[in-house]
Image (cartoon, rainbow, N blue to C red):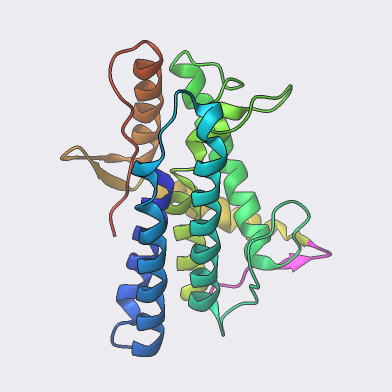
Amino acid sequence: EGKIKNQVNVLKYFAKYRKTADPALFGQILDMIKAVEEHLAELPKITGPAIDEVRGQLLSVEGRAANLYWQAIKALTAGKVEFDGREHRGAADPVNSALNYGYGILYSRVWGALLLAGLEPFAGFLHVDRPGKPSLVLDLVEEFRQQVVDRSILAMVGKGAEIEVDDGKLTDASRRELARRILERMEAPERLEGKKAPLTAIIQRQCRGVANFVRGEGRYKPFVGGW
C-alpha cells in the first residue's frame, strides 16, 4: 500500500507541472494514476491466515501497478532522455543505471536503520527469505524508492541535467551528482503524522515501527510522501 501510494503521489507531483505546459501529457498521466489507484483498491480485499497464503495476490497487484507507473515515467521523460522501461541488473541506459545506483544508496541507509532498530535484515515479510538475501531491507526500501530516488532522478532529467554513461556504466561525475542529489533529498523534510522531519529520520522511525509490530505493539503504518 505504501509503495503504490508513493508511486501515485510522485506521478501527481510531476504531473502538476504539466497541467498548463502540456495538457495532453497531463491528461495521459492522470489516466495512468487512476488506473494505478484501481489496482490499489484491490489490496483491502486480499485476506488470508498468513503472508505465504496471499503473497502471490499481493505481488500481482504490485506488479500491475508498477507496470503502469513505469509507463507514466516513460511518458514524463520522453524527449529528454531515452527510457523504454524499468530494467534491473545489467541495465546500460542512463535512467535505469541511475535508478539502480540510487537504490543502492537507499539500501545501505535502510540497512543501517534496521540494525539500529534491533531488527534482523535477513528476515522479511513480502520478500521471501533466502540465504544471503536481505529480505527485510528489500521490504522497507519499497515505500521509499519513489520519494527518495525516483523523484530525485526525474527532477534531474526534467531540469535538463545529463546522466552520463560510459561503456554501460555511470561516469564518476554522474555518480557523484546522483549521490549528492539523493543524499540531499534524504535530508529534505516530509510530513509524517502531522509533523515534519527529514526523510533520514522518517526511515529510522519506520524501522522502529516495524520493531513495534514484531513485538506486538500495534499495526505498521507505511510512510506516504506528499506531492
172 left or right of 138? right
Name the residue furthest right. Answer: 167
Q: Residue 19 appears at what percent x and percent y?
A: 30, 82
Q: Position of residue 32 (x, y in %)?
A: 42, 71
Q: Residue at x 30, y 74 (%)?
A: 16
Report if residue 203 lies within the magenta region. no
Q: Is residue 221 left or right of residue 84?
A: left
* Quarter where residue 81 is shown: bottom right
Task: List x then y, in percent, for residue 10.
Answer: 38, 61
| Residue at the image position 49 percent from the left and 16 percent from the top | 119
Q: Is residue 37 left or right of residue 126?
A: left
Placement of 122 over or under 167, stated as above or below? above
- In the rendered image, the quadrant that contains the N terminus is top left
Image quadrant in which the C terminus is located: bottom left
**Membership of 163 in magenta stretch:** yes
**Identity of the residue drawn at 62% across and 65% down:** 95
Is 84 in front, or is 17? Answer: 84
Residues in magenta, as a range: 161-168
- Residue farthest top in this picture: 215
